[in-house]
Amino acid sequence: MKVKKLAFGLLILTISFVTMPLVLLSTISPLKAKNVEMAEKSGLKVTPAANNLPLSRYIAQSSSANSQSDILWHNSSTGETQIWLMNSYKVASRATVIGENGRPTAIGSPWSIVGVGDINSDRKSDIIWHNSSTGETQIWLMNGYKVTSRATVIGEDGRATAIGSPWNIVGSGDINSDGKSDIIWHNSSTGETQIWLMNGSKVASRATVIGEDGRATAIGSPWNIVGSGDINRNGKADIIWHNSSTGETQIWLMNGSKVASRATVIGEDGRPTAIGSPWSIVGFGVFNRRQAID
């Protein structure tokens, strides 16, 4: 892969103690502490987290320019989805996601959370689910921590999409800068990366990611897509890769579905970072309110 040095867009890394594979998400809606207080008063469960719970964590960038990234958790045993509202590195409050009926949701296998993004352009983050058995992709349109409605993703022909292995959803973000999150797929067999440009829950069009030379990219193991986000603050989501063999982290700066340039993440000393197991990238977001992805 062709690289050049990049001095911005730090990534957050942490040791994985959870039981499910970690997936990177792009946005979480800004919730207020009073929402959690109201939930508690109405009898809803707002639970503390413990390190030994079977939780998967997702670090997500807030869709509000004045907000910070929050953390979305999912419990693979109980099916509970929980949001941590963050104040920098401190948890300000926590809330369990509730459904349209006001009750806590409980969703388990074969469903899994594969992304988060502002699907309907209301500046509130929504949750993207995928069913590994049926291939269905479903979107939960959210109002804070409450599900307002659910929609199955439909293709250009108006029919429900059913996509399974070797394709996997590996990220979400506003690729074409239209204010609506799009879905990024990767084919583990061919190495193809494909973008679904979305209009709400409907696929408006699909595009294979092409490189600087105009040809389709084909990237496979040991490289893996570990996230997406607007690294260079141009209003378009970029793609983050990690090499499990060398520990290199590389960013593809995107112009829509075309790679404009590539850059290896460098440390404070100006040298390329090389981080491997047992460390893994589990998320990214705006943690210090300067509107650049960390």
Image (spheres, rainbow, N blue to C red):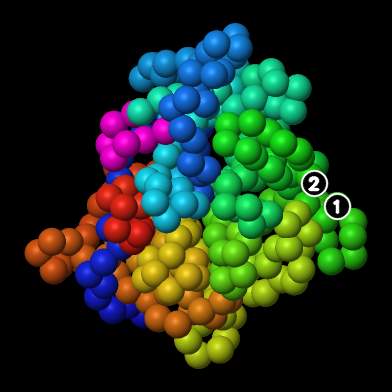
* 239 versus 145 height, above or below: below
Point 38% across, 66% down: residue: 231
Considering the image in quadrants, where does the C terminus appear? bottom left
Horizontal arrangement in the rendering, residue 36 relative to residue 274 (left or right): right
Q: Position of residue 28 (x, y in %)?
A: 51, 44
* 178 versus 87 height, above or below: below
Q: Which residue is mark 2?
A: 152
* In magenta stretch: residue 246: no
Is residue 142 or residue 11 the one in the foreground? 142
Furthest residue in direction left, as rendered = 269
Point 48% across, 41% down: residue: 30
Q: Mark 2: give few (<14), some (14-19) or many (20+) Cα within 10 Å.
A: some
Q: Mark 1: give few (<14), some (14-19) or many (20+) Cα within 10 Å.
A: some
Q: Position of residue 2 (x, y in %)?
A: 36, 80
Point 9% across, 64% down: residue: 269
Disc 2 residue type (three-letter): Thr
Q: Which residue is mark 1?
A: 160
Give the residues drawn in magenta, as a range: 85-91
Considering the image in quadrants, where does the N terminus appear? bottom left
Question: Helix, strand, or loop for circle 2?
Answer: strand
Is residue 160 or residue 182 the one in the foreground? 182
Question: Helix, strand, or loop for circle 1?
Answer: loop
Disc 1 residue type (three-letter): Ala
Q: Position of residue 280 (x, y in %)?
A: 35, 45
Given contact means CB atoms under 8 Å apart, are the residues at marks 2 and 1 in contact?
yes
Tell me, yes or no, if residue 266 can be seen here: yes
Point 78% across, 59% down: residue: 202
Horizontal arrangement in the rendering, residue 183 relative to residue 285 (left or right): right
* 289 versus 251 height, above or below: above
